[in-house]
Image (tube, coloured by chain):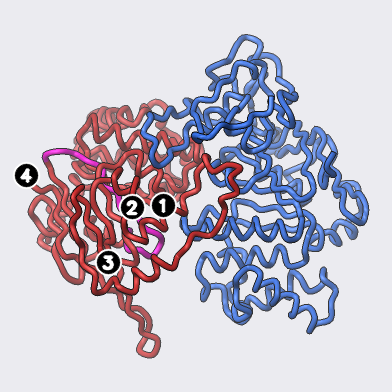
Chain colours: A blue, B red
Amino acid sequence: MTENVLTVTSLKAYYRMSYFGVDREVRAVDDVTLSVRKNEVYGIAGESSSGKTTLIKTFASAIRPPLKIVGGSMTYHFENGDIDPYAAPQAKVDALRWSHLSYIMQGSMSLLNPVRRVRRTFEDFAFRPMGLPRSEFWGRVESHLQRLDLSPNVLSAYPHQLSGGMRQRVTIALATVCQPEFVIADEPTTALDVVVQKDVLAMIRDVQRQMGSSVVFVTHDMSVHANIADRIGIMYAGRLVEEGPTRTLLAAPRHPYTAHLVASLPRIGDTTPKVALEGRPPNLAEPPTGCRFHPRCPLAIEKCTTDVPPLEPVGLDHRSACWRSAEVRPLTRIGHQELEVAG
Amino acid sequence: MTALLEVSHVSKHFVTGGRLSRSHIDAVVDANLSLSSDASEIFTIIGESGSGKTTLARMILGLEHPTSGDIRFEGKRNAERRTRAARRDFYRRVQPIFQNPFETFNPLKRVDRYLHASARTLFGARTASEAESVIDGALHKVGLSLREVAGRYAHELSGGQLQRVAIARALIPNPSLLIADEPVSMVDASLRMSIVTLLRDLRDEFGVSVIYITHDLATAYYISDRLVIMQKGYVVEMGPARPILDAPEHPYSRLLKDSVLSITDAGTDGLVSADRSESAAAWERVGTATLQEREDGRFVRL
């Protein structure tokens, strides 16, 4: 059994608001149980408003009202001991940041301060957590930049002087310079061109392998997940509906939503008609009863409208939350080669 | 063949900066393309950011004037449309769809107000009931109805629905050409295909031609009839879409295709940076290279 870095047990994070005496509750993360292992890339996929951003906010222990943790637990198993960021004292949680737990953010343009040189940003974020003398610190930063194929000159540049791909690499360098054990990457490549996107993804993958850290990678683009993730978890309307090793999940999905997500992707050389999923993601303030996917599900039966399906093992390392998971068939065939599907 | 749109030898040159830091940018260099009015088609412009694809679209829309060359829509240049009425007539025939539907619509306005305004000014509806029937017709073409949209604000609709409303608005004056600038890049992957398929259905059922600007080769392969691939302002490959994407000939086109991530690569560990040397070498020669025709009808700059 491989070691886990993060264990999450039936985590519930709701937005609770009260306007004009009317209480509103948005169940953005509802009953999520998952674990992230050492030295793996865990992909989280889902549409917008599926709760994936809220989920990683809770991972990063960056929650602010109206978002509240309503139930469940979350424990990090770092080398220097286990810690539950919601039970530990604030000072201890702060000490985790950047040296153990870091974050590659979306939109590098808005992350880097436009009126400060990149050098200052590095100093702000990484100097204290690293706890090294100044000369040694800059030596480490420069060698780390080189690993990401950036010249040390970028340190004296302002963000607007760098191209989009370089800026994104700077934010990756910033997040990984302290060699954290756990990195959260929130759509780091959505704003990039195809050629640069592949470079940046390759770089994230290389850095992750060299450091042996775990990465939680969030994006709605399944083709990105296919290339970078070891395991994928699919979020739908605040719940984790399926989780499994990348190849198995893509080739033999066991949840109708995943099957649709995979089948709807266009590919070069493939002219078969694509069926888009009918309907729209549910409103999380009033989610449908039972399985939240049932109004859009082609396999829905009576039971789906009343009972919530549990996330249960359907294969080796593969879990699905569907009452009819055994009947889900892949809607498209990926690849010509024989896929070894764990059964 | 009567030409709907003719772009001949169009270049656009931008000068930025002050006296000391002046820099010159060739956004588009010597672009040629034409769309026929006899058969509707989806014409795709592919390129990375900075390739000049948006500048080309803006010139076609008359928002930017070419530095040299000619753009004629139904035989007439944009500069010849001097009066307000002439420009309005032009926008009845050519309509844009923008990238981010959440930025297209003012969050404080109900989305149907845009539809009403378009029905009044562009379609020329005189009464409220006439406008409503026109709007409902346009919304039906995109799979929505006025009942679903009326009185709603932008935040009450999903990204996919909002982009459909934006397309419906563009369809109100029954245009013959839609210019869609990355219409799906801000839309969720699962809804992306429904928008792309909608563009294809508009071509097939209502005879609307579409200039589809994108950097996504997979959706381009799926719907387009013809395409051009642009590298920093130069058209490097042009012709029938599927033959080009199946076997791109120009090094830059090959680089783009190699960089496309696909779900079929899962587990192959194929995440290696694409080789740019050939594309860079081709870029060195771009000034002297000319477009050469190939047997399958494509043009390659070599």
Q: Is disc 2 on the same chain as disc 4?
A: yes
Q: Is disc 2 on the same chain as disc 3?
A: yes
Report the mark closest to the observer, 4 or 1.
1
CA distance for labels 3 and 4 = 27 Å
What's the residue type where badge 2 is placed? Pro
Whether residue A236 appears in this view of the structure is no
Q: Is residue B95 left or right of residue A266?
A: left
Q: Quadrant of residue A120?
A: bottom right
User: Does the segment drawn in magenta span residue B48?
Assistant: yes
Going 46% across and 41% down the picture, which residue do you hit? B154
What residue did someone put label 2 on? Answer: B248
Task: Determine whether the residue tagged by mark 4 lies in a helix, strand or loop.
Answer: loop
Q: Mark 3–mark 2 contact, CB under 8 Å?
A: no
Q: Is residue B82 left or right of residue A300?
A: left
Going 25% across and 38% down the picture, which residue do you hit? B119
Report the mark closest to the observer, 4 or 2.
2
The region drawn magenta spans B38-53
Tell me which label, 3 or 2, sits earlier in the chain.
Answer: 3
Which numbered dot is residue B257?
1
Q: Mark 2–mark 1 contact, CB under 8 Å?
A: yes
Locate the N terminus of chain B and report the quarter of the image it occupies. Answer: top left
Tell me which label, 3 or 1, sits earlier in the chain.
Answer: 3
Q: Is disc 4 on the same chain as disc 3?
A: yes
What residue did someone put label 4 on? Answer: B1
What's the residue type where badge 4 is placed? Met
Relative to A268, is B23 above or below? below
- Image position, residue B57 (x, y; %): 27, 56
Chain containing mark 2: B
Which numbered dot is residue B28?
3
Chain containing mark 3: B
Of all residues, the one furthest to the front in this rendering is A338
